[in-house]
Amino acid sequence: MRHLIDILDFTTDEIDALLDRADDIIANPEKYQEVCKHKKLATLFFEPSTRTRLSFESAMLSLGGSVLGFSEAKSSSASKGESVSDTIQVVSAYSDIIAMRHPKEGAPLVASFRSGVPIINAGDGGHFHPTQTLTDLLTIRREKGRLDNLTVGFCGDLKFGRTVHSLISALSRYTGIKIVLISPDELKLPTYMKTDVLDKNNMSYRETTDLVEAMKELDILYMTRVQQERFFNEADYIRLKDSYILTAKKMESAKEDMCILHPLPRVNEISVEIDDDPRACYFKQVACGKFVRMALIMKLLEVEA
Ligand code: NCD
């Protein structure tokens, strides 16, 4: 039985095959309408989410399966003091696959030790978010036609941004990737990501605080929200929250075919005037999220079209 806890749980070939499958689902959705008939997906969200949970649910419904679950810790037995490990043993008796989001780093990994069914990490604290990465990779591949030879700028909260950590890990598998890390000093990429991923794989990267200076070299600009819920004090959040706001003026030096991504939700980081710029790909990215999750559910449940 396979789980998806860290994007590196899958080989590059497996990731490429998932993206191929997602492309085929987009092209031929009718082929997939019933492949998960009588299968149940449980979504256990101990932390708020709109798009990730709904995209999992929509993915399973589009495969002909059904869904159950909860969307906040207080409506689960966690509020009575139940451990993650007990919750998982119970839920795995009622479902065929589980997507789980939890504020504690490592909780989905712990769950996978106890689960009788595949576990998908739908975000664990400030750590990882591998299904957002599959979404990001599919969007990049569809927009740019490749996953190698790209200069990718990550801007905003690189410290707590779990989507950033997982996407950088995934990109370490591809050649010719240059990473530009754009953040305030307080929100720099954690040291473990630099030593265990960037340095270990000899990846080319640099750090800057200046978005405009970095703009002209980027093929992809990955904007992120400052993760308010992970701050220890409100004053720091207020000081840092508007560090970067992408405006039409700042886009002037960007490449004609640069692709702007954002895992959403957006707060202030991207001015709404950018939404009409053909380089804005974040709403296309949302659509990709459903299709790649359909491909993932099929893989983990070992069903074929
Ligand atoms: C992201 C997350 O939850 O980490 N959202 C998402 O899953 N689409 C990013 C964020 O919340 O800022």
Image (cartoon, rainbow, N blue to C red):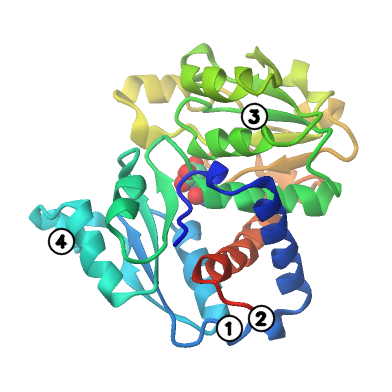
In percent of the image, x 84 and y 23: which residue is there?
216
Looking at the image, do the residues carrying marks 1 and 3 touch, with CB atoms under 8 Å apart? Answer: no
* Distance CA(mark 1)–CA(mark 2): 6 Å
Q: CA distance from mark 4 to mark 1?
A: 32 Å
Q: Can you say which quadrant of the picture contains the N terminus?
A: bottom left
Query: Looking at the image, is mark 2 or mark 4 nearer the viewer?
Result: 2
Quadrant (top left/top right/bottom left/bottom right) for the C terminus: bottom right
**Cα distance between the residues tagged 2 and 3:** 36 Å
- Judging by the rendered image, the residue that carries numbered circle 1 is 35
Identify the residue under disc 3: 154
Q: Secondary structure at mark 1?
A: loop
> Who is closer to the viewer here, 278 or 29?
29
Report the Cα–Cα distance between label 1 and label 3: 37 Å
Does 128 sit left or right of 243 as displayed? left
Q: Can I make out residue 291 in this image?
A: yes
Q: Residue at x 63, y 14 (%)?
A: 209
